[in-house]
Image: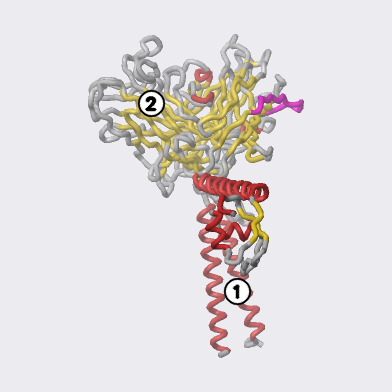
Amino acid sequence: MYTYFLQMKKQTNLLISAFLLLLFTFTNAATAIEFSGTGGKPAFPREENPRTDSIFVHIMKPGETVEEGIRAINNSDVIQTLLVYATDTSPASAGGFACKQLAEPKENVGTWINLKQTEITLEPKTNRVIPFTITVPENYDVGEHDACIAIQTKAAPSKGEEGGMSIGTRSAIRVAITVPGEIIRNIEITDFSAEKGSVSAIAKNNGNVSIDANIEIILKNMFGQHVITYGGEFPVLRDKPKEWHFALPDFFWGGWYSADLTITYDEDPEAQTGVNTEGKLTSLEKDTIWLFIPPSTTGLIVEIIIVLFILINLFVLIVAIKRKRWIKHKWIEYKVNRNDNLQILGEKFDVSYNLLIKANKLKFPFILKQGQIIKVPPSKKTD
Amino acid sequence: MWQSPIFQKILRKLNITFTLFILTLSAGGLTVTTTVFAALTDTSQFQITISAGSLSAEIVDGSYATVTTPTVNMSDPTFGFTCQTSGSTGLFGTATEQIYVQNPDAADGGWTLSISANDGATDFWDSAGTDMDFNDATNTGGIGCGEDSTSEPDTIKGMMTVDASVGGGADLAVGQCGSCVITNITQEASDNFDEGGTDSIVMLTAAAASNDIGDWTLQNVVITQTIPAEQPAAADYDIDMRITVAAT
């Protein structure tokens, strides 16, 4: 018996060990990401502006040249030949930031950038810095001017066999150059609405530099309780209206909700992309809007059942009240005869014997005595 | 003493603890997400080099392996004497060809994912016969059905719409990252190309507060191409598009 017990304990320990092994194995399978793409990032970020970790930000006078560098990265498992090139920005939907393609001629800020190397072959999991210069032309206007530095593999997108749409990919980094002078930082909210399952806001940048604006849309239910907050910090580019469309989630119950919009940003001309001043932020608000959000299918069914339940109960209650009033005001007293019983009286006065029991608060076994006074509905048969 | 049940029990407990310790160590090793190089020097100092990561966009299959020749299959419309505003549709981003964005701490201020024609705004659906435009948004008998003879250098009609919105059915999800969220990444509204006005369509915008380290997939982006009236029947219309993930 003791040996059997020991064997069982051993098996239990084995099972626990196996379970833990599996647990750790699968946990790691879920969390380990092998970053595999190709792309680039700024090679020389500056401490005073944390944004320069991600994009190129410079304040430059007309005629000035700065030296910069982009770290071209190949995190794939194969040797990659990458094209590294500067482009102008592309007019994009929703006021978003996008870059023109390699095939498109550079006409604006893309021409300011001179890369020392435009093609690079990298071994797997390696990277290399490509130096470049940015030169602002003489007499260029004050404000921010954006461009891109893009990296893509040299191989062209492959064509489908019989027509169709082929897809290529690339990554790009924004280059934000600000020519100093009379900097204007101003945003206005031009629209705040809700439609087609989303709540939308549009803000127009009236200034001459891009602004990192913090948008916050707070959704509350009809009882004023906070439900969800949308938003975040997004760049609102110069001269462009920026659109936000936040999709509304499925609400189980649905109903009427209010939405409040607030946009905060640094209006101080000393602020720049990636660096706010220590002054007070400007806050813009828009009137509260109300929106109806339909319930989920299950929620709708539950709501219909609840409404039906309430309506039926209400109907029953109203009928009961009316009947009570009818009994109280219209019913008359009746003296029970020798052969009367509830069934006979029910037929005689065209009323159910159950109602006679309830109206007269009779108790089981509901036997009527001769001469007993009870209430009955008014009828011609009372004689 | 060695046969003592208490000692045996302690040994078993130690065995489990040791197993846990080893597993924890190996777990730590497995979670390193980039290339790790460790060298033991003669002074017994460990050295770790984590290679730089970059914001990137790819088309990958269900196992996150790069798809070398990704395409979007468009439906085959029939020839029509009238303009067909929803003439051909296709799904960009499928279970086997997912749009995949990786941000290994490379774009902390946010990013955008956009799509545009590989040859730029003057590109078109190329055919051996009559070409077809993808960005002529002139509204004559339906948007995308007319010909803009003033601002466009071409004489072809047609327009493409890209819908990556939640309402349109596009599906944004976290990729392999176990602790990431899609919060602070906005799926943009449906929009159409319009030469000179909208040359790129933004599908996703990540706010500064989005995960600095993470990966995401996007599927079921609806592509709709307006087929102009009397566009000749042909099976060889093709166009190269390129998606761009840009640190902003």
Residue B96 in picture, x, y percent from top left = 38, 45
Q: Could you tell me which secondary element the residue under label 1 belongs to?
A: helix
Using a 10 Å C-alpha cutoff, classify the residue at mark 1 as few (fewer than 14 neighbours), some (14 to 19) or many (20 or more).
some
Report the amino acid beneath label 2.
Met
Residue A358 in picture, x, y percent from top left = 63, 58
Quadrant occupied by the C terminus of chain A? bottom right
Q: Nearer the viewer, residue A204 or B32?
A: A204
Badge 1 is on which residue?
Answer: B15
Whole-angstrom CA distance, mark 2 to mark 1, is 64 Å
User: Is B162 placed left or right of B105 in the picture?
Assistant: left
Specify the quadrant of the image occupied by residue A357: bottom right
Q: Could you tell me which secondary element the residue under label 2 belongs to?
A: strand
Subunit bearing disc 1: B
Q: Residue at x 46, y 29 (%)?
A: B190
The answer to whether residue A129 is seen in the rendering is no
Using a 10 Å C-alpha cutoff, classify the residue at mark 2 as few (fewer than 14 neighbours), some (14 to 19) or many (20 or more).
many
Residue B168 in picture, x, y percent from top left = 45, 35
User: Is B147 placed left or right of A162 in the picture?
Assistant: right
Q: Compared to A38, does A105 lie above or below?
A: above
Task: Identify the magenta region.
Answer: A275-288
Q: Residue at x 55, y 50 (%)?
A: B178
Residue B108 in picture, x, y percent from top left = 60, 36
Q: Nearer the viewer, mark 2 or mark 1?
A: 2
Badge 2 is on which residue?
Answer: B160
Q: Is residue A233 magenta?
A: no
